[in-house]
Amino acid sequence: MAETTAAGIVVNHPNRRILNPTQPASRGEVAALIHQVLVYQGKISPLPANAAAANYIVGR
């Protein structure tokens, strides 16, 4: 988990400071995770810094 957090892959809503790794992930959380993996791989552009959703990327 530490490596994915450092890479900016982990997304947590509504509070990025409290992770619940044993709780089932929602469809939206999985979509956000896939998005961040694609950003990490350089396949798509990251969210703009002023996008509201960018506030939930852990480690940012």
Image (cartoon, rainbow, N blue to C red):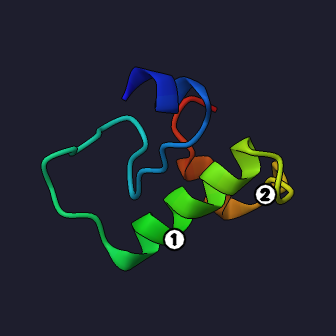
Residue 30 location (% of width, % of height)? 43, 66
Nearer to us of marks 2 and 1 is 1
Instruction: Name the side, left or right, on which 11 lies relative to 36.
Output: left
Residue 21 location (% of width, % of height)? 21, 44
- Classify 58 as above or below 56: above
Residue beneath disc 2: 47
Q: Residues within 10 Å of mark 2 (few under 14, many from 20)?
A: few
Question: Please, what secondary structure does the residue beneath circle 2 have?
Answer: loop
Q: Nearer the viewer, residue 28 or 13?
A: 28
- Classify 10 as above or below 2: below
CA–CA distance between discs 2 and 1? 14 Å
Residue beneath disc 1: 31
- Classify 1 as above or below 26: above
Residue 19 location (% of width, % of height)? 28, 40
Q: Tag 1 or tag 2, which sits nearer the N-term?
A: 1
Q: Residue at x 70, y 55 (%)?
A: 38
Rendered-image quadrant of the C terminus: top right
Q: Nearer the viewer, residue 56 or 43?
A: 43
What's under tag 2, amino acid-wise?
Leu
Q: Residue at x 38, y 48 (%)?
A: 15
What's under tag 1, amino acid-wise?
Ala
